[in-house]
Amino acid sequence: MKKTLIKGTGRYVPSRVVKNDDLAQLMDTSDEWIRQRTGIEERHWVPEEGGVGSSDLGLEASKIAIKRAGWTPEDIDFIIFGTLSPDIYFPGSAFFLQHKLGLETTPALDIRQQCTGFVYGLTIADAFIRSGYANKILFVGAEVHSTGLDLSTRGRDVAVIFGDGAGAVCLEGVETDEPVGVLSSVLHAQGEFAEILKIDFPSHKQHPIIDEKMIREGRHYPFMDGRLVFKTAVRKLPQVTYAALEKARLTVDDIDLFIPHQANLRINQAFAKSMKLPEEKVFNNIQKYGNTTAASIPIALDEAIEKQRIKDGSTVIFLALGSGLTWGAVVYRFYISPERR
Ligand SMILES: CC(C)(COP(=O)(O)OP(=O)(O)OC[C@H]1O[C@@H](n2cnc3c(N)ncnc32)[C@H](O)[C@@H]1OP(=O)(O)O)[C@@H](O)C(=O)NCCC(=O)NCCS
């Protein structure tokens, strides 16, 4: 049977490190407030002068993942790009990345799933691979948030949370009867709550799609009902984790590492508490990156592999909740090559 395996991962963040104290120079906030409420200590932002898009960050992460997979860009059958911060309004960043990889007509798809970009993207890739439509798929999650944030006190609740970055994963179909690869996936969406985390403008509901009044009111900046997002995440993440485990016929004890989206350290700590997990079973790196949305899980995965928190045969679960509202979880088991069994 064909299984979807992770063959290579890569991450890239811009070199500009923005500390909480740097933000306190721009708005009424403090290192103490940000650390206490979110766990974030610093994040990486693209250069202030601009000119760097999510496809540029995605390209750097992709080059690393492709090399580690032992692929060349020409091997890629399909590209899936998760972002809420595309280079331009349309078309999506997948096309810019495809061209930058030197490819000519490789199909490329943008998905707009925000923080659940990776769990949705991995599920789509797995379905494409198992159906035989494509065998080598590059998933990239990349965000340039910093250029779109309100850096005044008005926008402080959102501005302190988000970071720029990219993560890439090479996914390949392999014939094997071993219980490896994507073992289960559970995805959800609830449009009833679409407006609790959003950017209103530009909007095609009006002409022109954005005007000076909207800009004055800051409606081109993200809006977030942080408390509601927090409460919903703490409730839904354990539910969807149990559902994905049940579908894979596994229990919490079978999971070697939980890799949640990095939205807020307190959300992940509450998740761990409700699942009765020891701290070392949940991977967190929001302290260094902030919330990088579609990039957060692939960045975390790449770091977890680098830190040897994942080994051959490890079973992991990826889980996320974000704007849409969307949430989901994917159970994945790493392959043990026959010679190492
Ligand atoms: C955003 C978040 C950190 C705010 O924390 P909170 O404990 O809910 O704080 P509140 O929004 O209730 O605000 C508490 C106070 O802090 C203030 N505040 C908000 N942002 C601030 C900042 N950056 N610095 C200092 N004070 C801030 C508020 O104005 C409020 O002041 P008031 O009591 O005088 O009105 C938290 O709600 C959160 O993380 N939510 C989830 C966000 C998330 O995961 N988003 C991504 C989804 S994928």
Image (cartoon, grey):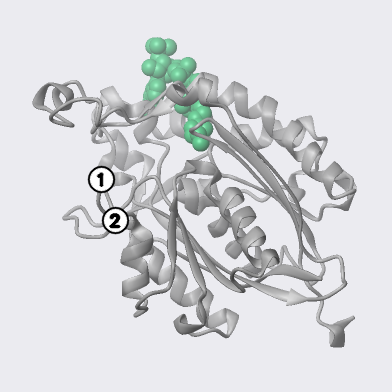
Depth order, front residue of 220/247? 247
- Pointer 2 with pointer 1, Cβ within 8 A: yes
| Real-space CA distance between mark 2 and mark 1, rounded to the nearest whole angstrom | 8 Å
| Screen quadrant of the N terminus | bottom right
Mark sitting on residue 46: 2
The answer to which of marks 2 and 1 sits earlier in the sequence is: 2
* Circle 1: element type: helix
Q: Quadrant of residue 199?
A: top left
Task: Say whether residue 302 is left or right of residue 149.
Answer: right
Q: Quadrant of ligand 1?
A: top left
Amino acid of disc 1: Thr
Please, which residue is most extreme toward the bottom here? Answer: 339
Q: Position of residue 42 (x, y in %)?
A: 42, 47
Q: Amino acid at mark 2?
A: Val
Left or right side of 159 for 315: right
Marker disc for residue 147: 1
- Local SS, label 2: loop
* In this view, 175 is above or below 197: below
